[in-house]
Every structure is written in C-alpha cells, then in structure tokens.
Image: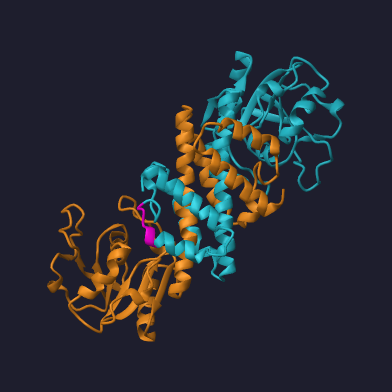
Chain colours: A orange, B cyan
Amino acid sequence: MIRVVLLGFGHVGSNLFNSLDECQKASVIQIFTRNKIDNNDCPKVVECITKIEDLKEADVYIIAIPDDAISSFSDSLPFKNKLVVHTSGSVPMTKLSAQHRKGVFYPLQSFTKSHVVSFAEIPICIEAEDSQDLALLRKLGEAISEKVIEISSEERQKLHLAAVFVNNFVNHIYHISESYLEENKIPFDLLKPLIKETARKIESLAPSEAQTGPARRNDLKTIEKHLHLLEDSPYKTLYKQLTEAIQDTYGK
Amino acid sequence: MIRVVLLGFGHVGSNLFNSLDECQKASVIQIFTRNKIDNNDCPKVVECITKIEDLKEADVYIIAIPDDAISSFSDSLPFKNKLVVHTSGSVPMTKLSAQHRKGVFYPLQSFTKSHVVSFAEIPICIEAEDSQDLALLRKLGEAISEKVIEISSEERQKLHLAAVFVNNFVNHIYHISESYLEENKIPFDLLKPLIKETARKIESLAPSEAQTGPARRNDLKTIEKHLHLLEDSPYKTLYKQLTEAIQDTYGK
C-alpha cells in the first residue's frame, strides 16, 4: 500500500483524492491545506491538517497548489530526503527544493471541484530523479489510470502548451460563440451537439482530415458574408486570423 | 407518411437518408444525384436516379448539394409550386427559385459519410414561406429529431457563423496542437481525454465559467515561457492573439 500525503486540496487535489481513495493500491493518509477545509468538502475518511509540523511519515508527498507557490512551499516542508512531487504541467521538476527526492505526477486533465472525473482515461505524466522513485510513481499512477507515461520536464512543458490550445483557447472560442449568439438572441444550446461531435470526431480522424468549412474549401463568398456580419464586432479580427491560418495550412 | 425526394447524396444527404429511412413518419421515395451513386453507397431500398426528368411526385424535395449550386439547381427542377427546401446554413431561403414553394431544413451538425450520427440530438432549423409548409417541415423534423426550431434566414446565417467558430476553428486548433506535438515527438493521443472533457464541461457550465489557464489568471510568467517555446513557430502569432483575446475578456 502506497501511503500518500496530499499537500493542497483545490481542483487537482480533491479530484486526486477521490480517485486514490477508491483504489486498492494506495491510501491517502493526510491532507494538508493552509486554511481549514470547509466541513462539507472535507473527506470524512482522512485526517485534514493545517499545521505543517503535523505531517506524517509517507511514501510520497504530492503538492497540488498553484504553480507560483510550489517552489517556496517545497522549501518549507519540515523534512529531508523524502519523495516530494508536484502536479503541474509547466513547472520544471528542478524547481522543487533540493532537500527532497524530487518528482512530478502530472494528470493531464482540466479539473473542476464540482465535476468528478474518472482518472482511468487520464494520462498521468511522471518524472523522477531516482529510478526507484520513478517506479513508485508508475505504480501509483497505474493504480488509478490506464495511461502512465514518463515524460521529461521539457516535454511536459510542450505538452502543457499544446493543452493550453485545446483546452483554454478552444473554451474561449466556445465563449465567443456564446456571446455572439446571445447578442443576437439565438440560444447557444443549439451548438452543443456540434461541439460534442467536433471533439468526438478526432478520436477516429486526424484533425487535418476532419477539417471542413468555408476557410478549408476557400469559399470566399461565405467568408465575405461572415466578415460582413461581424462588421462592428470585436470577434472580426479573430475570425480573419483563424480563417487565414486555415487557408495558409491547406492552400488558398 | 411524408414522401421525401433527396436531391444530392453527399455527407448531408446520406446521413439524412439513414435517419429518414429508420423513421416511421417519412419515407424517402427517390434519391437524385448528377452522377451515378457508387454501388456500395447506394441504398438498396430506394430508387436512385440521375435524370432529372425521372423525378416522382413527392411532398417535399430536399436539396443537399454544395451552397454555390443550390440556386441554379433549384431553377433547373422540372416542376412548379412544390415544396423545395435546401439544407444549408448560410444560403438564404430566397435563393431558391421563385417557381417553388420555398423552405429550409438545416440540420446543425458536421457530417461525414464514414460516421453515421444519430439525428435525435441534432437541432433542425426550419423555415418556410407558407405556414402549411412550415408545419410539414416541423412534422418531418420531429420525425427524426427531438429539437426542431423555426429560424429566419438571417438568424440561420448568424448561427452558421457561430458554428464555424466552434467547429472549423476549434478543429484547426486541434490540428495546430497535433502538428506542434508531432514536431516535438510527443503523442497527440495524450490530449484526447482533455479535448473530450473540454467539450463535455460546457454542457453543465457556461464557457465563461469554465475558462481556466495562464491567460485567464493573467499568469505572465507561464505566458512568457510559452512564447519562448514558440519562438520560431508559426503558431506564436495565434497564441498571442488568443491569449490577448482572453486577457481582454477577463481583464489583465
């Protein structure tokens, strides 16, 4: 049984807890947070602490706090030579304090507290300085996910950058469509099946093969019409930029 | 039983046929295409014709051909005063020939021949000049979909524009991520669960509430790091533009 202490109980921490709590091969023995966890949020089955001196002996300490705070927080931990990992996509492993055996345990997903996601499908990207630690992280990862992959800090940063495109940028495009339709009193709900299908399609088709639309077929008439509709809209520039990006990719 | 003739058998036509063929309240009695349909593609249960003179009497003629060809094709139909509709998101109803009772039957989805989608969830946007024709289109729509909505040509064009954002532009962003990861020898598959979850999330959360990421929290350090990673990349401009668009929306 791998003994885990969770340091932080935000979106990542709480989702990680739910998943580890259900698995047979690991056990969360403590959760540390700077502020007391709300009673409703606090898992009944585990000790929640707010004093760092109360930390127990564990096999791995998982830091799940904002990127900016990881480095100094790892410095403040009152022990040495234990396996301490963070869960961030963009922070290099070396940012962890030199007093620890360092590692990374990055679940590639976008978490919200309100929606519990199943970890089974979530890729977990692991990294460690020490090969035994790497083996332990692999075991821990495989206890909750079907996809555990060793990835260097450099690769992880690139993966995180690509994730920003497909998650943050894509969501912003959803937001633009919603705002535009709202302004025109057309229900955004009408687009939801299309949004779902667009995401589903690339499970079996490469995005380049799935590409359709006026820009792809260089349908200048429709593009003109759209630009006209967006005449005084803040979204016109982005429409143009993305249309040109597609035209550049597939040829005008 | 509503008698339907399909004019065109591309992505929309073939998906529409599959759906109508399964429903109880309508029957496709003929499919017309300019060129003979490939034997494997041709549905066994229906007459496929290539001569426009062979068209039979029907309750509704559904044109499912490329946007540019709709107007002149509707002119070439050898009859008058019948209900003729098209299935396009961006072509106004008035582009149909004046010799027909005009209408629109626009299924808001992105179709591929290889993947049969269920029409039950697909919104069908209808429009007609005549109220009886509108009622017939509603009945036809409701025979295959749970969501039939009357929408004017003007609104439909706006809806189609929003669809370009969430379908074509989003897919291009998938493509960019794939290319970037490929260049860096990192498997794109790792992003698929995130892509799925990003689309799923907005079923229960408004896109503005679902927005996360470096641009949303104005994390300039990570943004700088990403721009550095993209130094010589063609995707740098788009990263900047989308990041600025998010910053403008939520405040820097």
Task: Residue B175: tell me if it is visible.
Answer: yes
Q: Residue at x 53, y 58 (%)?
A: B236
Magenta stretch: dominant secondary structure: loop
In this view, B141 is above or below A71: above
Q: Quadrant of residue A3?
A: bottom left
Q: Does B235 sit above or below residue A196?
A: below
Relative side of A188 to B8, left or right: left
Foreground pick, A158 / A6: A158
Count of picture labels: 0
When asked about the image quadrant of residue B156, the answer is top right
Residue at horizontal 42%, vertical 59%?
A: B223
**Left or right position of A121 against B75:** left
Residue numbers of the magenta segment: B217-221
Q: Is residue B219 magenta?
A: yes
Please tell me which residue lies in front, A121 or A169. A169
Q: Nearer the viewer, residue B219 or A8?
A: B219
Residue A54 image point, x, y percent: 13, 72
| The N terminus of chain B, quarter of image | top right
Q: Residue at x 66, y 32 (%)?
A: B88
Q: Residue A209: say if magenta.
A: no
Measuring from the top left, give residue B6's x and y in whole percent: 73, 31
* Residue A42 percent coordinates (x, y): 19, 57
**Residue A183 % position (x, y):** 46, 29
Question: In percent of the image, x 62 and y 27: which residue is there?
Answer: B25
Quick check: can you spot residue B204?
no
